Image: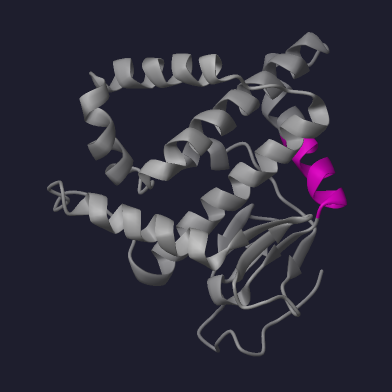
Amino acid sequence: MKKLISAVLVLSSLAFLTACDAGTAAQIGDTKISMDTVQTRIAEINAERLKYDTSQMELSVGEELNRNELRFLVISTIFKKIADKSGIKISQAMKDTKKADIFSALGGADQIGQALVSAQMAPADFDLYVEAVLISDQLSKNAIAAGVAESDVGTAVQQVVLALTKTEKVKINPQFGYWDPNGADLVSFDSAGTAVKVKTA
């Protein structure tokens, strides 16, 4: 499910944390994502994995899992900021309806646990995911209402994201890697190590 969100993102304005406290995993504008938040989500993911047979699932572990989780939290934060600046309001009723649609597609609410494990998403992330999808959907509708052809909607949404990241810089703790604006991805440093690879775009 995280890939659905990632597919509409093109992020820019790369910067790394050089003088932040060790408790910060990432910062988007004035919004910080703490190391504790990331660690708590990872603990949830690992705890949920113990409840299901994951032998046929391709699941991330270690640094890759940490990076995947932080990527999701950063993307969710970006969508929230876009919604605030665009005047998009996501109500609880809208979330509940979207969740019901997801449960129906899965074959029942009791299937969500295994689906989240397969998607490598912490239970606490599900609400953020639903909200991000709804915001993305609304941005797409806004683009169409403004006369954008359906085939160009994805590009239009990407431009909204680019505009946000130009004004609110995305900073990543080098422990997790760095944000690649060209690939729209949080990627690892190469094998030479992370200690000296601290740059500011």
| Type of secondary structure dominating the magenta stretch | helix
User: Residue 15, image x and y in percent?
Assistant: 76, 67
In this rendering, the count of numbered labels is: 0
Does 53 sit above or below residue 149?
Answer: below
Identified at 75% across, 40% down, the residue is 161
- Residue 30 relative to residue 53: left or right: right
Classify residue 137 by image quadrant.
top right
In the foreground, 174 or 186: 174
Q: Would you say residue 171 is visible in this rendering?
A: yes
Looking at the picture, does residue 177 appear above or below residue 153? Answer: below
| Snapshot colouring | one colour
Instruction: Name the image quarter holding the N terminus.
Output: top left
Query: Residue at 71% of width from left, 23% of height from top?
Result: 139
Q: Position of residue 186 (x, y in %)?
A: 58, 60
Residue 132 in percent (x, y) is at 58, 33
Residue placed at 67% from the left, 77% from the top?
21
Left or right position of 55 against 72: left
> Is 167 in the magenta?
yes
Q: Which sits in the foreground, 84 or 2? A: 84
For the C terminus, which image quadrant? bottom right
Q: Is residue 82 above or below residue 59?
A: above
Q: Residue at x 38, y 59 (%)?
A: 42
Q: Residue furthest right?
A: 167
Q: Which segment did they paint magenta? A: 158-168
On the question of residue 180 being in view, the answer is: no
- Measured from the top left, where is residue 64 in percent x and y? 42, 65
Any magenta on residue 157?
no
